[in-house]
Image: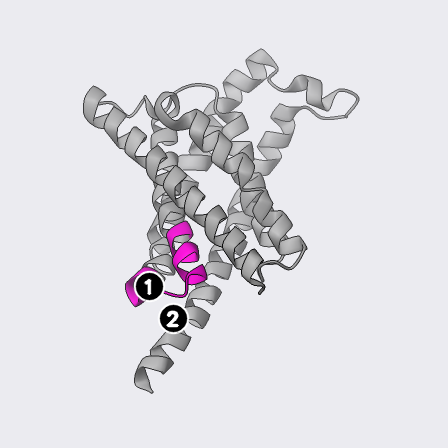
Amino acid sequence: MSPLSNVYLCTYNSLHAIGWAIALSRILSSFVTTKSVNGAYASAGELICLLQTAAFLEVVHGAIGLVPSGVVNPLMQWGGRTHFLLAVVQELPSIFITFVAWSLSEVIRYSHYTLSCMGSCPYWINYLRYTAFIVLYPIGMAPGEMWLMYQALPFIKKRHLHEHLFNGLPFSYYNSLMVLLLGYPFLWLKLYLHMFKQRRSKLGKQHEKKKL
């Protein structure tokens, strides 16, 4: 990797790490102040939408070979999260659960990427990067993303939400969301198993180095 590319990736990842840390602090601050989980979107929703929009660059990074992630997995994660944000129609506990899980996982992930670009990533950060997802991903998916989309169905049907995007199509946004909910666990499982594969690869190499 060229020095310029490395500087770009270091800057990109560090900005995202800071951004997600700020989002997490806003969510937790709102929770402590109001003693309620219903202020997560109001406190950090706009920032998280901005960070998630900017994260499309990771699909581009994989497409042009800047990073070895490829296109499919980053695109699936970006698409799933972006759709979740589109489905947010009211403050619900599932938003708080999802935003906290996202923020924790992204602070860890982007910190790991930043320190790796700098060539000084400690083992415990690497271990956390490839271990924390085991708990955080299921929490973000089941009681978070899927539950919110399910809760949003009556509101979407009543208000004909995003109907204009489906003009001329034989199905509505409501119908597509129903289909997505049925297939969501299988798409999520693909990403989850991919992370376990990465975990074996990354932590296994470090374990071998320690033996040597």
Asked whether residue 59 appears in the rendered view, the answer is yes
Position in image of residue 147 (x %, y %) = 43, 33
Amino acid found under the numbered disc labelled 2 = Leu
Q: Who's the residue at 48% across and 20% down the image?
A: 89
Position in image of residue 84 (x %, y %) = 51, 32
Is 149 magenta? The answer is: no
**Badge 2 vs badge 1, beta-carbon distance below 8 Å:** yes
Q: Residue tagged by mark 2? A: 203
Position above or below: 97 against 185: above
Q: Who's the residue at 38% across and 61% down the image?
A: 130
**Which segment did they paint magenta?**
110-125
Determine the CA span between mark 2 and mark 1.
7 Å
* Residue toward you, 141 or 7: 7
* Residue toward you, 61 or 32: 61
Q: Quadrant of residue 3?
A: bottom right
Q: Residue tagged by mark 1? A: 127
Q: How many marks?
A: 2
